[in-house]
RNA sequence: GGGGUCGUGGUGUAGCUGGUUAACACGUCGCCCUGUCAAGGCGAAGAUCACGGGUUCGAAUCCCGCCGACCCCGCCA
């Protein structure tokens, strides 16, 4: 069998994979390897489904054959090597649901390459298994075809991304994983330095500073499928380490970068057989917040939030007049078909907005041409009619109104909009809704310190035409910051960066850093700006989230081979774990309980 | 840091207004079965009800604590 001169999926151990034999292979002698997926023993003929990464092929063992006894003894997940002849399934026995369903392998030899204990859980697609069990036995979870498919697709798409960027003259350059801690922003994972007692490296939250320095090094175009680390609380879309398609370009503006990102999405979706092309729609951050109450709206659906402050300016309703008197707003959203919501449903929706700080939620149902609501008595005839016009209310709809400060009304209604979409399941306007959200505020007041702080990243440049306001009105300076949103998920975030030391120091100064602090924390990048730093910008896109959307999962754990639990543990390897005394001593560490 | 859901044979669930044999499905084991493909039939084994306290004559069930998984708020440049 030592006949392989060219590497291929076929090896000395197998001639084919379990996914490739068809009627055309009929009559061929083949050897397959794989796992015993399922067995149907009829007391005479035995059918085995042999599975590998590529598919499933039915193997037949007949009572008169010497392999019969071995076939009888094989159990789930035994590793087998089967030699036999490809035959067409007789009569009406072809299985149209299987790619290999027209044929079977009539086995002449079956070797058991390894046995398996009974499984801790069923690998079949119909089996329900808890997340905890799956993560503990991740090596088995990954054998399930749905998970295996996610892993393979993820790998293929990274190849698509690489090819696309190489063709645009991007260079893949690795930036360090052992870097220095920066106290602002997310918490760092730190690594003690044995050679430097009391000193620590930090794992990077992103390659941000290094990739900018690469531009200053004249590398022109950089990319990396970079691993980022953040020691923060986890969610279904957040892991302590995640992968980002990170890129940076010299001599570009916002639109240049957007075109590169759009082209990448085009390539990725073309691989999936989907048509997606740029330029994607763009919206101002402030408009997005007003219309959707969230900076990553799911534009597969309409459901816009409408401002009703003017409509209710003379309202007798204290909830409205009170909010308006305090500089607040009154905003409404229509739930098409929402009149089916019971009082209990309305209570649940009210609880939802309360999580975002809202004091309550006013709701009205519109049935048979009439409003019904516990607060209807506070609405004048004119207001009732105006509401119908403004929101284009039809029979069977419901309207929800929030009256509060904009900073509370927006996220409350934004969350409500998401919930209304989940509950009312309106028709999708499109399958893939991309959106650029542009011109975020450059700075915002830090809630604790009262200082100005960056909204996204301290290296983002202000819009050139607004930079002069940094001295007089810094809160109203917009930035060259743009987020790419897909189906309500923040896929990526990028900006044109500051490339002069003067501008960078000015922004740091607004954030309360003096020159010494800037030098000690960001010396690397500001020093490089002194020596001919080119204008540059870039974007980082969450690869796990992108693959998650494509694979149709709500949890990025399903597209990461070995993810952590919500508490940051790996149930399979049992990380994190304590160090022993010798290690602690060597690292100059002492654990204080 | 806060809120919520959950934890019952190997797996997934039921039971949980306290009451004596903890139910069901899948899996496992045994027997039967020669064209199945989520094979089928008959039978069997398998559970200190996550853990630790408490209330009670009696706790899977009620109370407190604790551990773990998941979801959300805060947080996440």
Image (cartoon, rainbow, N blue to C red):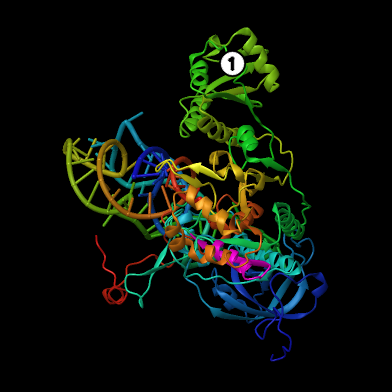
Q: In this view, does A123 lie to the left or right of B11?
A: right
Q: Is residue A331 above or below residue A193?
A: above
> Which residue corresponds to mark 1?
A312
Quadrant in which the C terminus of chain A appears: bottom left
Q: Is residue A499 left or right of residue A589?
A: right
Residue A454 x %, y %: 52, 48
Whether residue A209 appears in magenta in the rendering, the answer is: yes
Residue A234 x %, y %: 46, 52
In front: A401, or A170? A170
In front: A142, or A507? A507
Residue A40 in sight: no
Rendering quarter of residue A315:
top right
Q: In this view, does A122 lie above or below A453?
A: below
Q: Is residue B38 above or below residue A580?
A: above
Q: Is residue A444 left or right of residue A148?
A: left
For numbered disc 1, what is the local secondary structure? loop
In front: A467, or A360? A467
- Residue farthest to the right? A24
Residue A80 x %, y %: 59, 77
Q: Residue at x 69, y 90 (%)?
A: A1
Residue range in magenta is A208-229
Q: Residue at x 45, y 61 (%)?
A: A521
Label 1 Cα crowd, 10 Å radius (few <14 / some 14-19 / many 20+):
many
Q: Residue at x 64, y 16 (%)?
A: A367
């Amino acid at each position: 069998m030592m006949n392989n001169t060219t590497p291929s999926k076929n090896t000395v151990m197998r001639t084919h994979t379990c996914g490739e034999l068809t009627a055309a292979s009929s009559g061929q002698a083949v050897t397959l390897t794989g796992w015993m997926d399922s067995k149907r023993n009829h007391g005479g003929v035995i059918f085995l489904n042999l599975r590998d990464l590529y598919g499933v092929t039915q193997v037949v063992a007949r009572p008169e054959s010497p392999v019969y006894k071995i076939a009888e003894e094989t159990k789930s997940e035994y590793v087998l090597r089967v030699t036999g002849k490809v035959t067409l399934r007789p009569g009406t026995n072809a299985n149209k649901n299987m790619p290999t369903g027209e044929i079977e392998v009539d086995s002449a030899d079956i070797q058991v390459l390894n046995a398996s204990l009974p499984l801790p859980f069923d690998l079949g697609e119909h089996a329900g298994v808890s997340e905890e069990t799956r993560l503990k036995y991740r090596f088995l979870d990954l054998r399930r075809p749905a998970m295996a498919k996610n892993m393979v697709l993820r790998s293929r798409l990274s190849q698509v991304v690489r090819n696309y960027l190489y063709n645009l003259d991007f260079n893949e350059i690795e930036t360090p994983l052992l870097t220095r801690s920066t106290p602002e922003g997310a918490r760092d994972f730190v690594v003690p330095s044995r050679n430097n007692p009391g000193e620590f490296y930090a794992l990077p939250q992103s390659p941000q500073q290094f990739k900018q320095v690469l531009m200053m090094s004249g590398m022109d175009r950089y990319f990396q499928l970079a691993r980022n680390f953040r020691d923060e609380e986890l969610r279904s879309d957040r892991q302590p380490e995640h992968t980002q398609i990170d890129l940076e370009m010299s001599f570009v503006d916002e639109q240049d970068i957007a075109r590169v990102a759009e082209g990448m999405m085009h390539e990725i979706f073309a691989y999936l057989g989907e048509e997606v092309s740029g330029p994607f729609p763009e919206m101002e951050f402030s408009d997005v917040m007003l219309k959707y109450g969230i900076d990553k709206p799911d534009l597969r659906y309409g459901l816009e939030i409408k401002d009703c402050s003017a409509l209710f300016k003379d309202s007798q309703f204290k909830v409205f007049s009170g909010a308006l008197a305090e500089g607040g707003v009154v905003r409404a959203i229509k739930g098409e078909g929402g009149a089916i919501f019971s009082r209990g449903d309305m209570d649940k929706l009210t609880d939802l907005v309360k999580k975002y700080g809202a004091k309550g939620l006013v709701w009205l149902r519109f049935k048979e041409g009439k409003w019904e609501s516990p607060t209807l008595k506070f609405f004048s005839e004119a207001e009732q009619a105006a509401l119908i016009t403004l929101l284009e209310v039809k029979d069977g709809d419901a309207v929800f109104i929030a009256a509060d400060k904009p900073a509370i009304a927006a996220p409350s209604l934004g969350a409500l909009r998401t919930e209304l979409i989940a509950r009312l399941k309106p028709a999708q306007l499109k399958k893939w809704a991309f959106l650029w959200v542009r011109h975020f505020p450059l700075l915002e007041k830090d809630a604790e310190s009262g200082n100005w702080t960056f909204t996204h990243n301290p290296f983002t440049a202000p819009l050139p035409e607004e930079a002069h306001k940094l001295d007089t009105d810094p809160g109203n300076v917009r930035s060259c910051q743009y987020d790419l949103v897909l189906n309500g998920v923040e896929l990526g975030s990028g900006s044109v960066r500051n490339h002069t030391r003067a501008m960078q120091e000015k922004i740091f100064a607004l954030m309360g850093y003096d020159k010494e602090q800037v030098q000690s924390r960001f010396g690397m990048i500001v020093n490089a700006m002194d020596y001919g730093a080119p204008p540059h910008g870039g974007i980082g896109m969450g690869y796990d989230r992108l693959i998650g959307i494509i694979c149709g999962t709500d949890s990025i754990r399903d597209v990461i081979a070995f993810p952590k639990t919500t508490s940051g543990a790996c149930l399979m390897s049992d990380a994190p774990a304590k160090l022993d005394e010798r290690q602690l001593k060597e690292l100059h560490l002492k654990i204080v309980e």
